[in-house]
Each structure stands twice: as structure tokens, then as C-alpha cells.
Image (cartoon, rainbow, N blue to C red):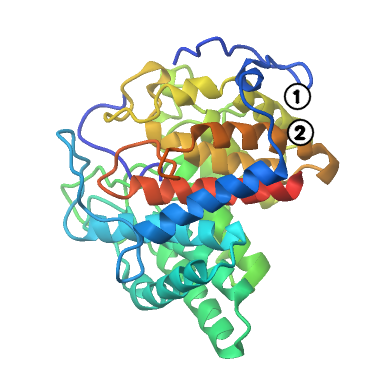
Amino acid sequence: MPSLIQNTIPLGIISLGIIGFSSIGHADETVVKNLPPTTPEAITATISRGVDFLVDDQNKNGSWGSATRTKDINIYAPLPGAHDAYRAGATGLALSGLIDSGDTRPETNAAIAKCAAWSVEYLPKLRRADQTTTYNIWGHAYGLRSLVRLHDRETDPEKKALYKTLGQEQVDLVNRFEDINGGWGYLDVFDDFTSQRPTGITTSFSSATVLLAMLEGREKLGIKLNEKIVNTSLDSIKRQQFPDKSYAYSHLHRMRPRADINRPAGSLARSQACNAALRGFDREGITDEVIIEWADRFLAREGWLSIARKRPRPHDIHFKISGYFYYYGIYYFTESVRLLPPDEQKPYAERLAALIISKQEKDGSWWDYPLYDYHQPYGTGYCLMALAWCKSAM
């Protein structure tokens, strides 16, 4: 999950044979030429392996992930709250992936039921770790996503009402942590005084992530949104938007449009989420042409993101890309492209599915950044959701 991840090093790709883009029909095809053909059957088999991994990897209490598998370059994580947030975010993604997979085997249903019980107990308790971090926003956003899916598959009216109530609560909780500049971030850089609302680095993609979860909650659960907070958060994203629809990493970066991290290659994943959020809330400027341009750009230049995959230090390569943006970008690619007319989605789904299948690990998981023991659940959750969309669009 991007922006769960940051350490004390400064914000730190050359694509190997994958350059250039124009339209889906004329983009450089290197990214897919060497990949096996993709069929719905191949997607189904890949999804099953991913589901098997999550079922086997689930914690006894129903959640996913833990604070183990530490490394020499550890991420700033105030105890215990940071790990509560990591676990909530990773669990929300894993559960959403399981549900979207459509797998109905008894062991899958049991895993979903166990996680539903965990979510009901623990999501209402999630808060920020301390004044310096608001990692909890990822737990609220992806917890809300999973509650939407639990509600959709539930037939018991009382449980459906419970999931809706819990979803509204996650929205109300995340509203408390909107930054004074609008939107949401994950660090509060001013640590010499205490304020009720964060006064740190609101980031474009954090804001987009929360807003898109809220949008899904409103559409599918009827959750009420605070329109003032929605608008100030959208305004924050717009302030971080450059004319070519690249997005600054954060509010503090917006005055440096040609800094490496803010250029199109650095914004490949952010642009998918930010464009989708602005379009979803009917902000002007994000046309079908913009969605198509950035979808083509993503597929043609995916190698920029891929070079960062599995590197242990964030932001340490070209364009200051971090590994944790890889599967984040994959998933929000689907959130963006699904806004196109249905007949234009299939070619993108075919190419994206081939890409995801090619990256699956031997154990059935996907991961892009070594984050304690949360990286495989969140990466697998992202990919299962993305593959479910690919299969549907195909």
C-alpha cells in the first residue's frame, strides 16, 4: 500500500526496451510481446492460486500481516498504532481480493467469514499512531472497501445494516484526519506542536485513495459524505495537478513541477488514482482522452515502475519511484479505465491481465515492496481485484 511506507531517508527508471506510447493500437508492444496469450481460463487459474495463498496466509484471528520479517532498512512505524494501520490496510485489501475473486470454495468462504468478524471488532478501534503519522487513513479507506463487499454478498438484513453502519463510521473517522491543506497524507512533519488536524504533507494519491473509497461507499452503501471535506480534498488534488495530468507527490512538492518525482514517469501510478478520483466526482478536465492517454502511458512505460519492484529502500532510483507504487498503480489503472465506455475497456483488460499473470510468485502471491509481513497480502489483494475486473471486461 503506497504511503504506508516512508523512512527517514530523503525522497529519493530506465525502462528496458519499453519506450514511447501513442494509442492502444500504436503503443510500443514490447510490454506484451513476450507474454503468453491471456484467456479467461488463464485468469481463473491465476486467481485460484492467489486465493489459495491468502487462505493459507491468514492469521488465526482472521486478519492478514504482522510486524515480522524486519530488515536492516526499517520503515518508521510508531508502536503499536502504525502496525494496527498496516494490518487494517493489508487486511482490507486481502479481504476485498478474496470477495472479488468470486471463489466459492468452502475454505474461501470460511476465510471471508473469519475476516468479517475481525473487521467488525477491530476497524472501529483504528486511530492514528501518534502525532507524527496518519497511516490509519489506509486502514479506513481499504476497510471501507471491504465492508462494501461484505455488504454486497450478505443476505441477512441485520448484518447488511451493520456493515453499512461500520462503513459510515470509517468515513467519519477518516474525516477527522483531513489535512489543513485539504486531502490526506500519512506523515505530520511539524512535530514541535500539537494540533487536532494534521498539518503535514497531504499527498495527491492518499487523497485520491480515500476519495475513491468514499465514492464506492456512497454508491453502494448509501453512505453520507461531508461535501465540504470532499470538495477541499478534490481542490487539494487539483492544486497538485500539472497541465499534462501528472501529479505532484505532495502539497510540498507542487511548486517543483520538473523535480524527478513529479514528472510523468514518477507519476505513472498516481495519475491513475488521481484522474479516477477527479472524474468520479465530476471535476472538469478528466475526459475519456485523458484516461486513454494515461492508460496507454502506463502500459507502455510500466517498466519505469517495475524497476522499483522489490527494492528495499523507498525512492532510491530514477524518478524517485518506490516499489510500493507498482501494484497500487495496477489496481488504480482498473479504477481509471473502468470509467471508459465498455467497448473500449477490453483491450486494456487483456494487456493488463497478461502483465499481472506474468508477475505472480511461485507461492501464488504478488508483492512489490518488503514491508514487514504485510506486503504479500496487500499485493495479492490488489491483483485479485484487478484480475476480477480484467475477467469481467474481457
Q: Nearer the viewer, residue 168 or 192?
A: 168
Horizontal arrangement in the rendering, residue 127 relative to residue 250 (left or right): left
> Residue 298 at x, y = what percent?
60, 27
Helix, strand or loop at disc 1?
A: loop
Q: Amino acid at mark 1?
A: Ile
* Residue corresponding to mark 1: 24
> Horizontal placement of 169 versus 88: left or right?
right
Q: Position of residue 271 (x, y in %)?
A: 57, 34
Q: Is residue 248 visible?
A: yes
Q: Residue at x 42, y 23 (%)?
A: 261
Nearest-to-viewer mark from 2 and 1: 2
Q: Are marks 2 and 1 in contact (CB under 8 Å)?
A: yes
- Residue identifier under label 2: 347
Work out whether 15 lies above or below 381: above
| View extreme (right): residue | 343
Q: Quadrant of residue 42?
A: top right
- Front-most of 44 and 315? 44
